[in-house]
Amino acid sequence: MTPAEVTDRFTKMNRIPVGIDCHATGGNINFTLLSEIGPPGDAFAGTDLSGAEVAAVLRHGNRIVDYAAHPSLSTFRYAAIFVPDGTPQQFVEDVSERDIKRIASRFGAHPVKIRYCGGADRPHYSAVLCRKRSRGERWSWHADIDADAVSYVLRKGFDGVVDFHAFKGDSGVRFNLVTSGRQCQRVWPNR
C-alpha cells in the first residue's frame, strides 16, 4: 500500500489510527493498522520512509503516533502514522542504548518509542525522542529485555505504559518498554 492508500483506508473507515506494524512476506511489505472509532482528523501515514524522511516530517511540526521498522537491502525503512500538533520530537536511527541515553540527555529529552533494528554483534535501535515538558516529569525506558523483566518493571506501579514493542532477538522474544509516572526509575539492569 502507498501512504495515500493507508491514509485513505482509515479516513474512509472513519477511524483514528493509533498503531502500525509491518512485516515482509515473499518480498512484499504488509501493513497492519490498529485504530479506534472516531474521525481520523489530520492524521496521515507514511510508508517506505528513510530515517531522514521521518526526521524531515517531524521537523515540520508533526508528531509520530506510532511507527514500525522493516529491513530493506542494507538499511531499514519505516512506516509511520503522524499528526500535525507541533510536539517537538526527534528521530534517531542506527543507535545503541548508550547512544540513545547520550542523545536524550544532551537534548533534555526522553524516548517515547523504541524499535529494535537487528544486529547480533552490535544491537542497534531507532527511537523517537521527545523533550521533557516539566522538571518533575519522569520516564523510564528498557530496551532488549525478556518477559520476566517486563513483569518486574510493570509490578513497580508506574502510571502508564507509553510504548511496548516485541521483537525476535537472538535469544528469543525480547521487548522494548517505555513507562511514565512518579515512580519511574531504571529498575532493571542492562545486559
Image (tube, rainbow, N blue to C red):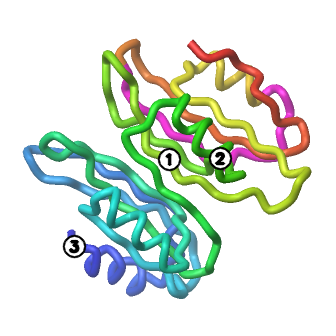
Residue behind mark 2: 106
The answer to which of 189 and 132 lies nearer the viewer is: 132
Residue 88 falls inside the magenta stretch: no
Say which mark, if any, is on residue 127: 1
Q: Quadrant of the N terminus?
A: bottom left
Q: Tell me where residue 142 appears, x and y as whole percent.
A: 62, 30
Task: Work out whether mark 3 precedes mark 2 in sequence or the reverse, and give the earlier one.
Answer: 3
Select label 3 or label 2 by which is in front.
2
Q: Give above or below for 145 relative to 111.
A: above
Q: Residue at (33%, 61%) from the top-left corner?
A: 52
Judge from the rendering whether residue 191 lies leftward or rightward of residue 14; answer left or right: right
Q: Which residues are magenta?
A: 155-169
Q: Residue 137 placed where, x, y %? A: 85, 51
* Residue 102 screen position, x and y as percent: 60, 37
How far apart are labels 1 and 3 at the CA level?
A: 23 Å
Q: Quadrant of residue 41?
A: bottom right
Q: Which residue is mark 3?
A: 2
